[in-house]
Amino acid sequence: MTTDLNTLLTALYVKIDDHLGRPTRTGRPPRLTDAELLTLAVAQALLGIRSEARWLRFLPRHLPGAFTYLPQQSGYNKRLRNAVPLLKHVIRMLALDTDLWTDATWIVDSTPVECGRSRETAKRSELAGWAGYGYCSSHSRFFWGLRLHLICTPPGLPITWALAHPKLDERQVLMAILDHDPTVLADRPGLLIIADKGYVSRELDAYLTERGVRLLRPSYRNRTPHPAQHLLKPVRQLIESVNDTLKGQLDLELHGGRTIDGVTARIAQRLLALTAAIWHNRATGQPVTRFLIAFDH
C-alpha cells in the first residue's frame, strides 16, 4: 500500500477511535473494534476489492500486522451489515469536521444502483419489493435495482442520502429525506439547492420556501427562464462528476449486495470512503478535494 493510503487510514482510525471512545456495552469486547471495522471497510472501497473473501486474504500479505485480528468472511459481512447506523454516523462526523459542511450551496440528484439484470434474478432476489425497474436517461436504458438519492456540496461532500425504489418520485424522496433528518437545514441561512428538471414541483417549491431554502433548476421551454439559468450547466456537471467518482472509482454499481441490508451497507461503505478521502484531502491541504487516485493502489 502507498504511504498516502497508510496516512489516510491511520488518521481515519485515530479520528473514529477518539470519537467513539470505549464501548458502553457489557461483556467481552469484540476482537475487531468498530474503529478497525470501519477503517477496513474504507480501505477495501478505496482499493476497489469488491470480494470480501479476497479482501481478507489480501490483508495479511500486503498489510501484515496492521490488524491484530481479522474475522472470517461471514463474520466481516455480518459486522458490516449491522454497522449501517454506525457508518452513517461516522459519515456525518467526518463531514462536520470539514469546512465544506457549512457550504451555502447543495446539489441534489439521483443515480441508478443496479442490483441485477436477468428476469430470473428479479423474480428470485431477496431485494424484490425494495428494488424495481427504472429508467436511466443518462444512458438511455432500463435497469433493475434501486436509486441513490444524494445531496452533496459542489466539491462532492455527502450531506445526506437515501436508497429508494426507482419508480418513486424524486421530489417526494427529497422531501422525505429532509423530513427524516431536519437538522441538516438548521443554521443555513440563504441555502441554495441546485437540481435538474425532475425536481419541478409547486409542492416542493412551497416545502422548501417554508424552510428558507431556494431551489434552482432548469426551466422548461414553455416557461420563463430563471435569471441565473446560465450558471446551471457548469454546476450541474459537478453532480455528474460526483456520480462518476462513485461509479468509476468506488464501483457503486458493482456492490454485490443481495439483500437490502447488504446493499445499504455497501453503499454506505463507499460513501464513507468518499467522505474520508475528502476529509483527509481538506485537512492536508491537497489542491483537489475529491482526489482518490493516491489511495487506490
Image: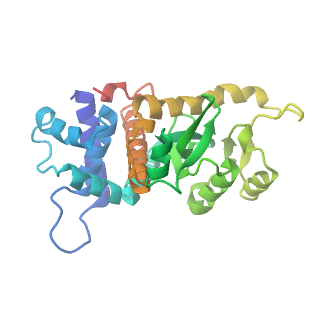
- Total count of labels: 0
> Which residue is more in the foreground, 103 or 53?
53
Residue 248 in sight from this viewpoint: yes
**Residue 161 rendering spot, x and y as whole percentages:** 53, 50
Residue 17 in sight from this viewpoint: no
Vertical arrangement, residue 223 with respect to residue 160, above or below: above
Residue positioned 76% across, 34% down in the render:
218
**Residue 259 rendering spot, x and y as whole percentages:** 41, 54
Residue positioned 21% across, 29% down in the render:
1
**Residue 134 rendering spot, x and y as whole percentages:** 61, 42
Judge left or right: residue 222 versus residue 133. right
Vertical arrangement, residue 89 with respect to residue 141, above or below: below
Quadrant for residue 278, please give it.
Answer: top left
Judge left or right: residue 201 versus residue 273. right
Judge left or right: residue 15 versus residue 181. left
**Residue 5 rendering spot, x and y as whole percentages:** 27, 32
Residue positioned 17% across, 65% down in the render:
29
Judge left or right: residue 210 versus residue 116. right
Residue positioned 89% across, 34% down in the render:
224
